[in-house]
Image (tube, helix red, strand yellow):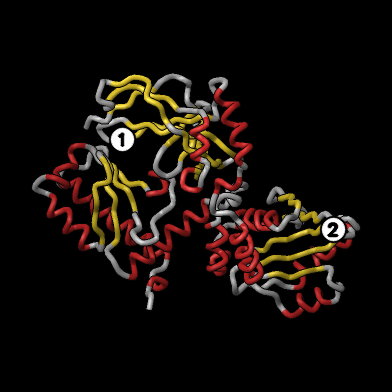
Amino acid sequence: MDDAPNYSDDILIADLKAVQEAVQAWATAQDIWFDCGFKSYREHVDGEPSETDPIVCVQYYSSDFEWALFGDLESEFSELLDRHGFWYEIASAGNIYYYPQEGPRSRAYAQYFRWLWVCSLVQEDFADIYEELYRHFAAHPDDLHRLGWRDYEILLARIFQTQGFGVELGPGQGDGGVDIRLLQRDPIGDVLTLVQAKKYSPRNKIGLETVQAITGAAFVEGVKGMVVTTSSYLPSAREFAARTSGRIDLMTSDHVASWCQTAESGIIRDKSTLVSRRAVERLLLDVKQKTDSRVLHSSWGYNSTHNSFAVILKETRHAALLMSLPGQTLTDDGYGQRGTEAPLIDASALGFHRADTVWRVKKRFWKDGTMSFWDGANLYHPWDGRPVDFDYYD
């Protein structure tokens, strides 16, 4: 039996805070806590968390703290973490990953951080790319009431869009009690439905007043109405809705879970099929003619320099689909270990229009007005058209 539910969010947060405070106090006493601190894994990489080995936090450190990693203080540091139920791994120069020890608490942390990640996907245009958003709520409808009220409205709007509705999401405040407007095109006549989203705790049931309000708004506009809640309805509310001759629908989290299941199954996992081969051919021909911001470059490596190239296939406000591009060596040292390279944009690039080389990324916007693309491992920027250096010598 999984005991993960016995660890509430508050307990997990308190345990994490306790170990962070203990490490800082210990390192301060050892006079090695300089330019050190903690951040979340999401802040560090903005990527999908592991479902089996959750990274509960990332510690960044300076050279002084290396005494706790490579010097005489290592065993003392490890024992300190062990007393709190954690262990560490050196992720890269200047960063340490903290993990919980195996067991129910580790599984609870995995669920907690995955929940935070799912919440981060409740954006206006992530849901057509991240099927995990729908999968989570299809499997865990009780989590719907943990969303913020605006996130709940956005999620519902995205679900209705997957069902083929034209959707107008209200401003969130001052909307006259109508959170979402749904338009269903029909040859006989378009059908408009006014939706009120009620993100209530399970114990706070929807009463007569709420149903009367949406009914009044629907009758004034001569359209249908719907209430969707994370809770349930009092008998008086259901009785009133029953007298509207099907004009008012009352929906709960069970309905939302079913909608999510349908939406999740409808999202294509092979992202390459979202863009036709002919469209990719036209795109490659277009970007080949000039320096184009849709061609991206990422440089990576530890004590070496590697490059990756990609092209934007599809983008929305917050996310994008990228396709890998092959590279071509322009100059080298005679051994192929050091030189310059650039993306190869020709017929061979079409071979990358497949499932394993078309992937999703998040957009990042910087204060200077520039934009980059992050996939959880590499940060891509628009390629400036000039050769880039590579160096494989370690």
- Marks 2 and 1 in Cβ contact (< 8 Å): no
Q: Position of residue 87 (x, y in %)?
A: 24, 57
Which quadrant is home to the N terminus? bottom left
Q: Which mark is residue 345?
A: none
Q: Which residue is mark 2?
A: 191
Distance from Cα at disc 2 to Cα at disc 1: 55 Å
Residue sticking out furthest to the front: 347
Residue at 43% in and 61% down: 112
Under circle 1, the secondary element is loop
Is 17 on the left-hand or right-hand side of 154? left
Q: Residues within 10 Å of mark 2 (few under 14, many from 20)?
A: few
On screen, residue 352 above or below 21: above
Under circle 2, the secondary element is strand
In this view of the protein, which residue sits in the foreground, 14 or 69? Answer: 69
Is 369 on the left-hand or right-hand side of 390? right
Is 11 on the left-hand or right-hand side of 150? left
Residue at 27% in and 63% down: 101
Residue at 74% in and 80% down: 235
Indicate the amino acid at tag 2: Val
In this view of the protein, which residue sits in the foreground, 16 or 301? Answer: 301
Residue at 70% in and 69% down: 251
Q: Position of residue 209 (x, y in %)?
A: 77, 69
Residue 35 is drawn in which quadrant?
top left
Q: Which residue is mark 1?
A: 301
Badge 2 or badge 1: first in the primary sequence = 2
Indicate the amino acid at tag 1: Gly
Residue 377 is drawn in which quadrant?
top left
Which quadrant is home to the C terminus? top left
